[in-house]
């Protein structure tokens, strides 16, 4: 299936890739470094002071003295760079951690870009997902032929496989990238129950690590909204292509709840969302997609609703900023540094990018 | 279940931990840095030139033109430090990636220690495990009450829960560490079929990334032995508490194969294992454990067999080196820097620690 020689050359090329000029754009003290051409390159590196992973939240089944199971925790992988900024970034995927770790062609993902820019970065596998799959309830996985083709549509590479959108920010002629993208998934549970479970654990995380901006993709957005109602340490949300929302009771669309909501909550709870800046970000070609045309409209109406209640929400269409061809996972797209620059701008505009050393806490 | 204030203080303390003097021992150009006491600490950091993750190996089910699924790949997370050494370290867990990422108390794990020491580090989730759980076959997970207590025995914290071994290298009075340890697991598949599946994918990885020493824990050991027979890019194996072996046909123990082997192969295949240095490492208290007393004897006999066939295998009892109280997962134990120093010594003795810049490839 895979041309091994090509794959091998690519793996070598990825190892040789280092932090290039584009990654440095938008940083304090940016250096105009060239892309490395060998593994001996000794240009700017990310300086990590502390990294690791830990479990958070969850329950204990049974009697801890005799027969028990610790389960339903989330697992977060973190990196604290030198001269860190005060606010953490929590990266919440809806496909795989890999989507935050890499650009589609193997270039730097948001994890590296924002660690380089000084932010403590936390990548989240919520309860029952990935490295947190030691759940408190039984789960089943069934392989599904056709998921490749449904990814193609869900990730808005085109309207139907294999009809790519013109100018799509995916390296569509690169078999290595296609193979990686189709393997950049692991089992998820798109139910309201799981959204509550994941947000319970993430709220514990935020309470532990302090002020945190949640960056989410797709179904992660609903989970971050729930988390922000459970912990006041969530100080901002930037949701890439969020597909599910929380509404005040009686103000929702009135449709029955599906895997991504809607969820209605008392107004008092909803108002916790009005205290923080939120940006709902959408890629390109949504108007050509029967699937995404209505979700963008939902998103627009929801932003208006939040702001009507005194909130600070914003709809950001990347195409309006001159970024074209973005998919459902813009932070992994070929122009992800431009997407990152818009995020840096959002963080700066809302006072969320101070260095920890400049901050009185 | 968890004292939140304590947990919160601990999370803050972990963020404040930085690379302390002990982490630096055994490094070129070691700096006698003090442990940091605040997040503003700006002492030595790990310098990462490139990091990310990628999928490797696997199959495609169905017709890629119409209805398909990419599955059964492994997922590897990697960090390439500045001034990298030529040989990669592949960290193969048998419980969770977290065991390689952290010491039991949240201090630095082997990932950080060896990235700091200049080695490209790859952490492996094999096919169907963790972030690679997008398999080609159905899988089921059932929560099992009592797994906490069986971990206690399997990880050799003591003979029976909660009777800790005296002097055990686990912070046994620290509820935070206990909670983390019991959550440092995710679903695995201890079958020969899975061992072949995982080693198939890992062999593709080694062929891609080049000369690699596999570091394994428990059931990962058998998988690395299989991998070394499938790729000549595996140039060494250090197996922490390996519980399964490969034998030449007719030279095995003659017991029926269980979840960890034994596996018999033609002598010609077995001899591929004699070309590389291998170290079988055991912690302390194995003699007090009905479970581990026989496995150490298996290990000793296997080392003799490999060497009888011209190999370079070695049995290393950590206690013989003055390291006491080590568990089944010595690289996460409180004295893991001393365990790391022995690994650095092994790598040096076998010419596996040259800088890439010093190496003609």
Image (tube, coloured by chain):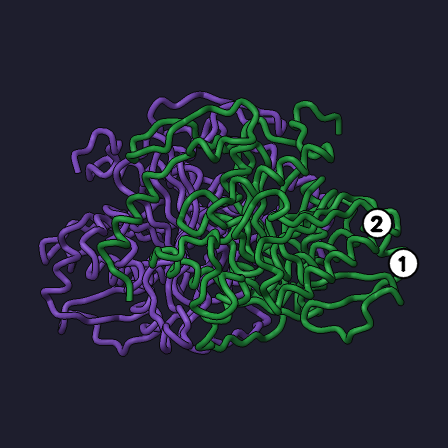
Chain colours: A green, B purple
Q: In the drawing, what numbered circle is on residue B34?
A: none
Report in which chain the residue with disc 2 lies.
Answer: A
Q: Which one is nearer the viewer's eye here, A209 or B36?
A: A209
Report in which chain the residue with disc 1 lies.
Answer: A
Say above or below: A223 vs A334.
below
Mark whose residue sits in front, 1 or 2: 2
Q: Is residue B206 left or right of residue A113?
A: left
Q: Can residue B295 be seen at all in this image of the molecule?
A: no
Quarter of the image for residue B342 reads top left
Q: Which one is nearer the viewer's eye here, B251 or B201?
A: B201
Q: Can residue B39 be seen at all in this image of the molecule?
A: yes
For label 2, the crowd category at 10 Å Cα-Cα, with few meaning under 14, some 14 to 19 and many 20 or more, is some
Q: CA distance from mark 1 to mark 2?
A: 14 Å
Give the SS element for disc 2: helix
Q: Which one is nearer the viewer's eye here, A254 or A128?
A: A254
Q: Which residue is mark 1?
A: A267
Label 1 and label 2 in one chain: yes
Say which quadrant the C terminus of chain B sits in: top left
Which residue sits at x=89%, y=67%? A250
Which residue sits at x=66%, y=52%? A239
Give the SS element for disc 1: helix
For label 1, the crowd category at 10 Å Cα-Cα, with few meaning under 14, some 14 to 19 and many 20 or more, is some
Say above or below: A290 vs B159.
below
Say whether disc 1 or disc 2 marks the residue closer to the N-terminus.
1
Say which quadrant the N terminus of chain B sits in: bottom right
Q: Is residue A153 left or right of residue A305?
A: left
Q: Where does residue A308 sit, x and y in percent of width and height?
A: 87, 51
Q: Where does residue A49 sit, x and y in percent of width and height?
A: 52, 32
Q: Which residue is mark 2?
A: A307
Q: Is residue A300 left or right of residue B110?
A: right
Quarter of the image for residue A180 reads bottom left
Q: Where does residue B159 sit, x and y in percent of width and height?
A: 48, 61
């Amino acid at each position: 299936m895979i041309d091994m020689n090509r794959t091998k050359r690519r793996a070598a090329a990825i190892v040789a890739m280092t932090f290039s000029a584009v990654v440095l754009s938008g940083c304090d003290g940016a250096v105009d470094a060239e892309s490395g051409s060998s593994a001996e390159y000794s240009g700017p590196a990310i300086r990590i002071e502390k990294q690791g992973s830990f479990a958070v939240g969850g329950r204990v089944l049974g009697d801890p003295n005799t027969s028990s199971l610790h389960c339903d925790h989330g697992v977060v992988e973190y990196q604290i760079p030198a001269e860190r900024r005060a606010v953490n970034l929590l990266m919440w995927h809806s496909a795989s951690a890999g989507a935050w770790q890499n650009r589609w062609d193997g270039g730097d993902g948001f994890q590296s870009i924002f660690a380089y820019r000084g932010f403590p970065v936390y990548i989240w596998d919520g309860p029952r997902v990935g490295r947190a799959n030691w759940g408190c309830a039984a789960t089943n996985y069934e392989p599904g032929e056709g998921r490749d083709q449904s990814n193609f549509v869900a990730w808005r590479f085109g309207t139907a496989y294999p009809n790519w959108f013109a100018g799509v920010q995916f390296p569509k002629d690169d078999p290595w990238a296609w193979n990686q993208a189709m393997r950049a998934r692991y089992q998820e549970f798109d139910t309201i129950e799981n959204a509550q479970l994941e947000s319970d654990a993430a709220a514990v995380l935020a309470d532990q690590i302090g002020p945190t901006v949640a960056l989410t993709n797709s179904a992660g957005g609903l989970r971050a909204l729930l988390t922000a109602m459970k912990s006041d340490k969530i100080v901002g949300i930037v949701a890439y292509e969020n597909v599910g929302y929380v509404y005040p009771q009686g103000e929702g669309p009135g449709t029955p709840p599906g895997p991504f909501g809607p969820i209605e909550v008392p107004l008092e709870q909803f108002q916790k969302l009005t205290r923080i800046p939120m940006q709902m970000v959408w890629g390109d070609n949504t108007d050509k997609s029967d699937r995404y045309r209505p979700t963008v409209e939902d998103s627009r109406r929801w932003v208006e609703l939040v702001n009507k209640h005194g909130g600070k929400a914003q709809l950001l269409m990347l195409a309006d900023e001159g970024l074209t061809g973005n998919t459902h996972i813009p932070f992994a797209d070929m122009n992800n540094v431009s997407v990152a620059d818009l995020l840096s701008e959002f963080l700066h505009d809302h006072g969320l990018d101070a260095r920890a050393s400049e901050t009185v806490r």
